[in-house]
Image: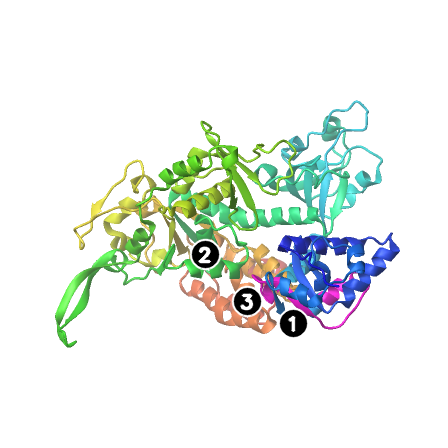
């Protein structure tokens, strides 16, 4: 007998998968567990979904029917062909040995095994997209963090003590956290967390901060007297809760001290927050500075990631939020899609001039009707700087601010609310406007609040939305919701705005900057830009018929090799218009690279070389002139290799020639025998053997 209660959405599928996994986790009900185990391993075709960053599987027939259960499925299995016809609307069928391996891993969690299968994966996914989650799980389990933990800050047990002020504890000169003076095993075991672990400090369901444990359990009399608390650990603050979304009220309401395994929602929340911090610390700070100053320069020694980081900074500045900015492949894919539209790239060199960069007269061959050349004319042609400026300007036939005002009239009153997609498109929002209010009412369609239909947990300031739409500011409380609203307005009215554009200038100090920029150096300052406080326009020398200004939405990122003194340094006029960010050679980047590639043995060799070469360069006997170790230290990228042969080649053909050039140019003062000893050791991928200097030898001989 056929069934016709088919699933209607992918959410229905996910609901059924969760139901099956619930059955699998219920080992107290042996009948249910045995039934679910049999269903789980004996399917022919499996649907794959990513739930809480975990790859989940379910036989297609079980998840093909809405709100399916054990009882419903036992009563009627339905028609598998009909189920497959429904799944085609949301999934594509694949067969891949790699998925078989992941499936076998999943079965092993329940002490099961099976053979090869076919799979349904979401239409907008590839097999590689699925496998990323398998790699992420592996990385999480093998990372330096044994586990993630969440710590409940609470009251002493009726001894008349005061409430533990968790935030105040974290604001100490050397931040600490504690769990309370109880005999409860959970609190006592707080001291067993290994150093380096990540801890979410919370108070009830409210997140306080994300921290890394950096010290052992200790007792400090002053702190104990102040807080009535014995279980203290030193921590490093990674991020405060006000900088990240609060968890759902039910997510951290249970227990006082818990570890989070990768399959839990708590783990996902902490993991996402940690990724957010990692991607927004350096990249976010650079982007923030760029938006304020309009022009920045990344400076540093070779191999420190100057050009590498420009792509992520550019995307962050352009407001790209739907990709992981720590995933360089994803960053470059999006970066390439924006080249020539919102991102422009050029490299300065000694022969580049104003005519190439801004505008100049270029020859154009004139032909007759037969295609024969009849002469050459010279016409103005835009350089990359002018093209980037022009890319900012868009059609002003419909002003975005006016469109927002018109849209407010359409959503006036709760009865006229609209459902609009979020920026990522994964969920949606209800928006409406109560006439006279300075904010727009906004609520997620997934909200489970019982405070009434018109409850507005995320009000959007109208004036700040207008500024965000014009690229002049942001709705700082709910920026992503504001952007979703702006996109809905654009779609409704086909409105256009001035879009932000990033111009990247690699090796900016290798060109004659005054010659290249000409009179436009003055126009680079933020207040001299169009829409600035003191805008300036100039008549360009070749096109003449147009008055030109630099748009406020044009952002310039330059890179500068601090080691290269063969070219001219930037003059003070240009320096005043740029903010400078120094990128240092960091061993932490090398450690992360080898941790991610699971090659600790090669990583140890690379790190020893890094430290030895650093000691060699910063040796006071070697370092001379006005350059520091940050200017000269060989960049971390030189030490990152997939194999020992590749590392050897990098040492022989990249690192040693660079250091040799330092010595030849007089930047490093190294004797020939010292150089020979050091180079021979590094070629064998070994640190230099410690050699006593001549003075010490003379002392010993005496």
Which residue occupies 49% across, 71% down?
Answer: 653
Q: Earlier in the sequence, mark 3 or mark 2?
A: 2
Among the 4 quarters of the image, the one containing residue 233:
top right
Mark 3 vs mark 1, CA separation in Å: 50 Å
446 is higher (above) or lower (below) than 623: above
Position of residue 358 measured from the top left corner of the image (x, y, whole percent): 26, 55
693 is higher (above) or lower (below) than 44: above
Q: Mark 1 points at which residue?
A: 96
Q: Which quarter of the image is occupied by the N terminus?
A: bottom right
Q: Earlier in the sequence, mark 3 or mark 1?
A: 1
Which residue occupies 32% across, 47% down?
Answer: 574
Which class describes the residues within 10 Å of circle 1: few (<14), some (14-19), or many (20+)?
few
Q: Name the residue under label 2.
A: 311
Magenta residues span 103-130
Q: Is residue 31 left or right of residue 245?
A: right
Q: Do the residues labelled 3 and 2 touch (CB within 8 Å)?
A: no
387 is higher (above) or lower (below) than 93: above
Say which element carries label 3. helix
Say which element carries label 2. helix
Q: Name the residue under label 3.
A: 678
Residue 205 appears in the figure: yes
Which residue in the rendered view is the most extreme toward the left?
374
Position of residue 300 measured from the top left corner of the image (x, y, whole percent): 45, 54
Position of residue 572 measured from the top left corner of the image (x, y, whole percent): 32, 46
Is residue 109 rendered magenta in the image? yes
Say which element carries label 1. loop
């Amino acid at each position: 007998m056929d069934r016709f209660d088919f699933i209607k959405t992918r959410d229905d599928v996910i609901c059924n998968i969760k139901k099956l996994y619930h059955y699998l986790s219920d080992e107290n009900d042996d009948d249910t567990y045995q039934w679910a185990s049999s269903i789980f391993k004996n399917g022919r075709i499996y649907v794959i979904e990513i739930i809480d960053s975990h790859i989940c599987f379910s036989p297609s027939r079980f998840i093909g029917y809405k709100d399916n259960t054990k009882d419903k499925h036992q009563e009627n299995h339905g028609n598998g062909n009909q189920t497959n016809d429904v799944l085609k609307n949301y999934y594509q069928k694949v067969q891949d040995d790699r998925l078989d391996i992941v499936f076998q891993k999943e079965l092993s969690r329940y002490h099961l095994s099976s053979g090869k299968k076919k799979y349904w994966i979401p239409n907008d996914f590839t097999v590689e997209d699925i496998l990323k989650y398998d790699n992420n799980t592996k990385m999480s389990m093998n990372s330096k963090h044994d586990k993630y933990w969440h710590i409940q800050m609470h009251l002493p047990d009726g001894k008349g003590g005061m409430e533990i002020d968790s935030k105040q504890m974290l604001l100490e000169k050397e931040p600490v956290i504690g769990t309370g003076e109880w005999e409860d095993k959970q609190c006592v075991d707080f001291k067993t967390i290994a150093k380096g672990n990540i801890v979410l400090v919370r108070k009830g369901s409210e997140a306080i901060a994300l921290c890394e444990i950096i010290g052992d359990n200790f007792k400090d009399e002053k702190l104990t007297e102040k807080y009535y608390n014995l279980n203290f650990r030193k921590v490093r603050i990674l991020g405060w809760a006000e900088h990240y979304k609060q968890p759902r009220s039910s997510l951290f309401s249970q227990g006082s001290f818990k570890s989070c395994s990768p399959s839990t929602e708590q783990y996902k929340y902490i993991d996402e927050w940690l990724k957010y911090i990692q991607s927004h610390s350096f990249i976010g700070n650079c982007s923030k500075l760029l938006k304020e100053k309009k022009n920045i320069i990344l400076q540093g020694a070779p191999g420190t990631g100057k050009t590498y980081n420009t792509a992520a900074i550019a995307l962050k500045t352009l407001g790209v939020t739907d990709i992981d900015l720590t995933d360089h492949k994803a960053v470059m894919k999006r970066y390439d899609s924006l080249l020539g539209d919102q991102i422009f790239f050029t490299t300065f060199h000694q022969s580049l001039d104003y005519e190439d960069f801004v505008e100049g007269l270029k020859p154009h061959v004139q032909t007759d009707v037969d295609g024969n050349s009849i002469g050459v004319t010279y016409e103005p042609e835009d350089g990359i700087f002018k093209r980037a400026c022009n890319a900012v300007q868009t059609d002003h036939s419909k002003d975005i601010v006016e469109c927002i005002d018109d849209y407010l009239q359409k959503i006036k009153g709760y009865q006229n609310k609209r459902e609009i997609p979020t920026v990522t498109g994964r969920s949606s929002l209800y928006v409406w406007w109560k006439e006279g209010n300075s904010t727009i009412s906004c609520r997620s369609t997934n909200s489970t609040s019982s405070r009434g239909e018109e409850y507005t947990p995320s009000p959007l300031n109208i004036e700040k939305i207008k500024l965000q739409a014009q690229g002049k500011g942001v709705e700082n409380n709910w920026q992503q919701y504001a952007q979703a609203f702006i996109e809905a307005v654009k779609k409704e009215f086909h409105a256009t705005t001035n879009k932000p554009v990033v111009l990247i200038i690699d090796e900016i100090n290798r060109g004659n900057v005054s010659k290249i920029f000409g009179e436009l150096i003055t126009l680079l300052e933020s207040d001299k830009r169009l829409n600035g406080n003191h805008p300036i326009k100039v008549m360009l020398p070749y096109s003449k018929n147009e008055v030109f200004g630099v748009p406020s939405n044009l952002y310039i990122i330059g890179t500068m090799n601090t080691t290269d003194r063969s070219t001219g340094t930037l003059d003070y006029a240009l320096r005043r218009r740029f903010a400078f960010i120094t990128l240092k050679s960091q061993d932490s980047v090398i450690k992360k690279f080898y941790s991610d590639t699971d090659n600790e043995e090669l990583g140890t060799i690379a790190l020893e070389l890094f430290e030895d070469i650093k000691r060699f360069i910063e040796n006071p006997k070697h370092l001379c002139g006005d350059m520091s170790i940050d200017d000269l230290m060989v960049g971390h990228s030189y030490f990152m290799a997939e194999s020992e042969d590749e590392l050897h080649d990098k040492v022989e053909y990249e690192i040693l020639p660079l250091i040799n050039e330092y010595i030849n140019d007089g930047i490093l003062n190294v004797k020939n025998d010292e150089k020979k000893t050091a180079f021979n050791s590094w070629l064998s991928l070994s640190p230099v053997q410690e050699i006593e200097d001549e003075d010490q030898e003379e002392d010993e001989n005496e």
